[in-house]
Amino acid sequence: MSPGTRSAAWRAHPPWVRAVLGVYVLAFAVGTGTHLDALVHGWGFAHHPLLNAYWTLLVVVDPVVIWLVLRVPRAGVIAALVTMLTDVGINSAVSYLYVSAPGHYVVNDFVQLQTMLLGFVLGSAPFLWMHFSASHLCG
């Protein structure tokens, strides 16, 4: 598909679809930058090597999600769901169970923002899925 054809296909989606996918792209771009920064400057805590490997892997996974959202939106929705479920699950477990802090949980703003994005992805995914299913059947 040529760039002009792709652009026309993108514009053919309703504004709400473009806006929701735009949020996905922006959020995963921020995630890419965050994980890249942590990779370059080091992780804040000494974590298990598998945790560091997962977070490092997100430097590649997040841009792949962006690419899928823009090129193969149904696959992008699935990739966004899987990525956010695992990322929030792992980060929440680390925040609540692994990091010791006297008297309170260590839940920072990033975990809260990720949880909000997970809610957004979970809430929007069924509508996107139905839209892309209908789009596929109609054209």
Image (cartoon, rainbow, N blue to C red):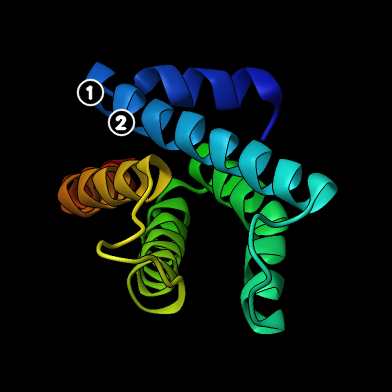
Task: Answer with left or right where residue 54 lies relative to residue 122.
Answer: right
Dot 2: few (<14), some (14–19), or many (≥20) neighbours within 10 Å? some
Can residue 137 be seen here? The reply is no
The amino acid sitting under disc 2 is Val
The amino acid sitting under disc 1 is Trp
* Contact (Cβ within 8 Å) of mark 1 with mark 2: yes
For residue 89, above or below residue 119: below
Give the label on residue 16, or none.
1
Q: Secondary structure at mark 2?
A: helix
Position of the C terminus, as image quadrant, is top left
Task: Measure how far apart labels 1 and 2 are at the Cα level.
Answer: 6 Å
For residue 94, above or below residue 12: below
Position of the N terminus, as image quadrant, is top right
Q: Position of residue 13 (x, y in %)?
A: 32, 25
Q: Position of residue 93 (x, y in %)?
A: 37, 75
Nearest the eye: 98 or 17? 98
Q: Position of residue 9 (x, y in %)?
A: 46, 26
Residue 32: which quarter of the image? top right
Task: Answer with left or right where residue 103 lies relative to residue 80.
Answer: left
Task: Answer with left or right where residue 101 lies relative to residue 15.
Answer: right
Nearest the eye: 30 or 129? 30
Give the label on residue 20, or none.
2
Residue 117: which quarter of the image? top left
Q: Secondary structure at mark 1?
A: helix
Q: Position of residue 62 (x, y in %)?
A: 60, 50
For residue 96, above or below residue 27: below
For residue 93, above or below residue 5: below
Q: Residue at x 36, y 71 (%)?
A: 89
Q: Residue at x 37, y 51 (%)?
A: 111
Q: Residue at x 64, y 17 (%)?
A: 4
